[in-house]
Image: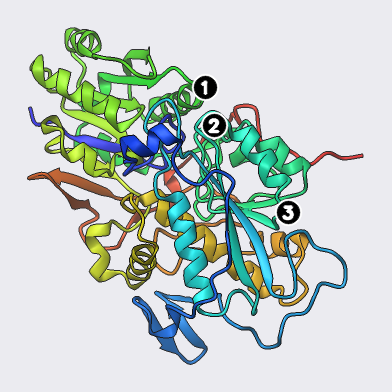
Amino acid sequence: MKIRVVALCCAVALLAAACGSRLSDDELATGGGTGGGSAAASSTDTGGASGAGISEGEGGPKIGSLPVPCGKGEEAPTEPAEKVPGVTADTIKIAVISDKAGQVKVPTASIEESMQAFVDWCNGFGGINGRKLALTKIDSKLFSHLEATKEACNAGVFAIVGSGSVTDNQGAQAMVDCGLIEVPGYTATAAKGLSDNMVQPLPNPSNFYPIGGALWVKQQHPEAVKKAAILYSGIDTAVVQAERIKLAYEAQGYDFVYDKETGVVQESYATEASEMKAKGVEWVTMVSATSETAKLLRDMKTQSFAPEVVDLGQQYYDPDLLKEPGAEGAIVQLNTVPFEEVDDSPALQAYMAAYDEVGAKVDPTSLGVQSFSAGLLFATAAKAVGNDITRDNVLAQLKDIHEWDGGGLHFLADPGANKSSNCFMYMEVKDGKFVRLWPEKPTTFDCDDSYRYDLKDDFGGGAKLKTS
């Protein structure tokens, strides 16, 4: 039987989970990235209304369908009447936190670079209401998110923007306690995904799970889902994600006959492949790194174990997956417009052009697109408050935004209400390339409110503001 690999929507809450995580060995050896270094606000006037993906309209330039939130503003900015952390008459300091180094290849490749791309792009239009952005880059090193958050708290920044870390639960409470606001590219855990002072472009609250993909697969493979298997790395983030998957999918009629916690890194998955084959498994998902899942697919192929469906997460939209022969025929679920459709998406063209200007050593990723969208979301809210920029005012504006697709970078979401996704789409690995499978029309997603499943469990809940 032909192997089909189906990606679980928003399954970014995993160990080494991002697509395109490809730092070089030298970068890994040196810790990668820039640590807590600061990137000064760009003084160049690149990009602007004539840049790729930008069109001119009656109200000014647009990135895709979104009015560009960056510009000089209607009046020159002034020094805040009362001191606002990270804000001066001409600058807004923000920070981005991502995993740049760790025990395995890091999951959040291109997040830091995507935020640098956004900062340079936004500053090319004149900043936000005339204030240029300055970016502080912080490495959470996979398991050091608390230390990274404390660094952000002490860095004198206005907000954390575009971030993404696998163990973001570690610093969730610290971020709230020190008064920061955050617009992350994505969240991985309940503590962050349900936390106060946080609004994200593509909400991932732990108490709901998007099941559009599950329903579609069940329709296509009704018998396979009755013999399901799930494997997941032995860290809390992956374990909780696996539990969410099981709860949501079992409610749709999936029967998990194999449930296995694996090592974070294993030399071989031959035992797991043999066990699943013996149990007659026909649907498989794995919550782990692309490199680990590639090993599993390799061992499955070696043992002639070809389940009807193998179901993986968004992070597997990764050229590294294409290198594994066992992945041929795979389908991968995405929440952003795939790079293969850049010609059909002006907003994605703008992102790619801005990313190219950074000269990054890592390829752009779907999570990087989410980070760029987070930058746009933050800038849209900050622009709306005008010269009276405070954390409370910007947060209030963020929570008032209930329709958001980053100008066409991803499916429509409700950031202000932190509402779970109700959309999905699939790519298929065909002849060593990612090709759109469903829905068939480029840049579109399959959306319906019935695709939101209430887990009736918040898995510990989010970080909360302390009340006196």
Taking 404 as reference, is 171 above or below it? above
State the image quarter where residue 158 is shown. Answer: bottom right
- Give the foreground label among 3 and 2: 3
Quarter occupied by the C terminus:
top right
Taking 297 as reference, is 75 above or below it? below
Residue 423 in percent (x, y) is at 39, 51
Disc on the earlier residue, 1 or 2? 2
Residue at 37 percent across and 79 percent down: it is 51
Residue 67 in percent (x, y) is at 50, 78
Residue furthest toward the bottom?
A: 58
From the image, tell me which residue sits under label 3.
156
Disc on the earlier residue, 3 or 2? 3
Pointer 3: residues within 10 angstroms few (<14), some, or many (20+)? some
Quarter occupied by the N terminus:
top left
Residue 106 in percent (x, y) is at 41, 35
Taking 301 as reference, is 313 above or below it? below
